[in-house]
Image (spheres, helix red, strand yellow):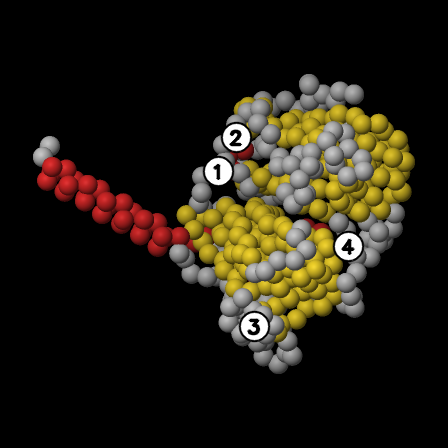
Amino acid sequence: MSSSAKAVRCCVVLIGCVFSLVRAAAAADGPNLLTNPGFEAALAGHAWMPAGWDTSRNGLPSVYFGRDTLDPHGGSWCVSVANVSERVPMAYNWSQTVVVGPEAWGKDAVLSLWTRSNGVEGRAYVLLQAYRDTTTKMSRVWGVDRDEALRRLKINRMDDPILDFGWKDAESTENETGWVRREVRVFVPPSVNVLYVRAGLLGTGQLMLDDASLTLEPAAPPAPATPKTQLLADGGFEGDGNDWEYSTPPFEGLRVERDTTVAHTGKASVVLEGEQGMIQSRAGVCQVFNNRGLAGKRLRVTAWVKTDSLKSSAFLKAYCNGLGPEAVSFPSWEQFSLNTPWTRTAFEFDVPKDTYSVWIWFLYITPAKGRVHFDDLAVEVLGEATGVIGPSKSGAGH
């Protein structure tokens, strides 16, 4: 090939690459689905509320929500949430609900939000959730509250067919930050009709928010389901704990946190304890895998458990959310209570073929006196589904 022909060929290839990049950028640069993303527009007739947004206000005097001009990231306004008491553990947040349809299915929803932490003791977070939530969708379509939508749909509260298909957050334990851009994404499976955007804190201090964006982009491929590979991030709690979701019912004195005083190996574990509460509930930690590549696989969950004077039970559980009417759950085959030295427990299960998200939980029944520690947790793919139901053959060794 002559040098001139080679030059022409190189130019053609280069032009093709440029056009490919332009097309990819155009595909990724979808419209912002959020209303009032910069908090610039005020809600008509309200003293401080921005249009299009909601809060988790619950009447406690220790929590403050506001919209002001104090050092916004962009434009003239930003919002903030501040809390000065940890007596009742709650996740206080700003939120927005976005109704979607088939145009979102098979794509990734990408949330971007700028946050600034002022004296945060605990966790600041940005969360994106993809739900099949027909009640909320119709309440928005009809312009009524959720209870009225349930009445019109002739659905009892206990029978509400709400189901999550995607859940991803970005957490921060930094005490002080400047403006930091946080981004999370979730795959949007068929039948999803509502996306929830939330940002706030669990703990004390102030979190400021500005310049939010929610777009639909071409879906990234699912992560490979490689056998014998640890799927959990920070299974030994040796990091800062930000890879975990924390379930903390609003019971006074409840603790669900990383503990550096007790460990099976390494320097830390997670501790669950609390004595007061109005009703029986569950508290614990989990990780969610928004990985459709796990469908049809067999998984093993392993944990080391230690209980101290526990008057309820501690256990493991998995939930698989798919296109069926409800989640498919798999409980562990052992429960622990009273005084138990560090003990290994494990269970296996098949992920249904229509699964889009898998939740792995490490839990205890609360409120109850005593405490439980979990450490050295693992989730691994064993291979294809086997159809076998029962305890792990590799089992619970002591």
Give the label, 1 or 4, closer to the camera. 4
Estimate the spatial distance between the alpha carbons at disc 2 and disc 3, rounded to whole Å.
44 Å
Q: Given the image, on which type of amino acid does mark 4 rest?
A: Pro
x%, y% of residue 316? 73, 34
Between disc 1 and disc 4, whose residue precedes?
4
Label of residue 89 in the image:
4
Image point (87%, 43%), residue name: 368
Residue 194, quarter of the rendered image: bottom right
Q: Position of residue 234 (x, y in %)?
A: 65, 36
Q: CA distance from mark 3 to mark 4?
A: 29 Å
| 370 sits to left or right of 259 | right
Q: Which mark, by number, is residue 222?
A: 1
Q: Left or right: 16 with respect to 105?
A: left
Per the rendering, the mark at residue 321 is none
- Residue 178, image x and y in percent? 59, 60
| Mark 2 or mark 4, earlier in chain | 4
Does residue 231 appear in the picture of this structure?
yes
> Is 140 situated above or below 166?
below
- Asked if marks 2 and 1 touch (Cβ < 8 Å), the reply is yes
Of labels 3 and 4, earlier in sequence is 3
Secondary structure beneath dot 1 equals: loop
Q: Nearer the viewer, residue 292 or 37?
A: 37
Image location of residue 192, percent across then percent down: 53, 50
First in residue order: circle 1 vs circle 3: 3
Residue labelled with disc 3: 77
